[in-house]
Amino acid sequence: MGKEQKQEQKILPFSLRAVYWREGKQWMSDDFDPMLPGKQLWGQFKASGHRIEVREAVENIPNAKPVRTCLITTNFQFRYLNTPPEKIPKDEDDGKYLVAEISARITVDYLIETSETPSKENLEQWASRNVALHCWPYWREFCHSTLLRMNLPVTMMPMIVIENKKD
């Protein structure tokens, strides 16, 4: 029998407290009729930027300890164009080719589980990897149901895959 190896247990800095919407919008061009068949559309998806905010609050309970949280808000967008994106001249605004757009801002709220607030670098790393895993199902469902309600072709957002980087 081999030697037992002790694995160092890594303490995760956060525990998930909530996922919620900040904003959700949908728009369709007045010039586009979703009921006319045979229209070809090209979809574009983008997840961009995130805002990180660390908060400390005391509940309105006698002798309550402060609650430290980290809120990370990410922007998502899906758009349909009536022309392939690669055929739109680089110096031209693609807005005139825009048929419909769905966007959302989703916040993931974490309790900070460590005695120290994680560094800005660690917060950025967490925001760019873990947050997507927590809010992606909400974005996928919103996109799917909104496209149905707009009578647009449903483009399923793929399941998210995040590659593990070796430290």
Image (tube, rainbow, N blue to C red):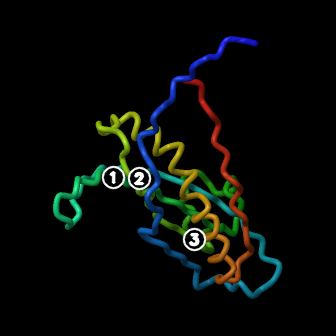
Amino acid type indicated by mark 3: Glu
Amino acid type indicated by mark 1: Thr
Q: Gap in Å between the C-alphas at discs 2 and 1?
A: 5 Å
Residue 99 at x, y = what percent? 62, 74
- Residue plotted at (81% across, 83% down): 37
- As drawn, 69 above or below 97: above
Q: Could you tell me which secondary element the residue under label 3 belongs to?
A: strand
Q: Gap in Å between the C-alphas at discs 1 and 3?
A: 32 Å
**Any mark on residue 110, and which?**
2
Task: Please say if the residues under marks 2 and 1 sit with CB atoms less than 8 Å apart.
Answer: yes
Amino acid type indicated by mark 2: Tyr
Q: Could you tell me which secondary element the residue under label 2 belongs to?
A: strand
Q: Quadrant of the N terminus?
A: top right
Q: Earlier in the sequence, mark 3 or mark 2?
A: 3
- Residue plotted at (72% across, 12% down): 2
Q: Can you tell which quarter of the image residue 34 is in? A: bottom right
Residue 151 at x, y = what percent? 70, 83
- Residue plotted at (47% across, 62% down): 19
Residue placed most toward the observer, 92 or 17: 17
**Any mark on residue 101, and which?**
3
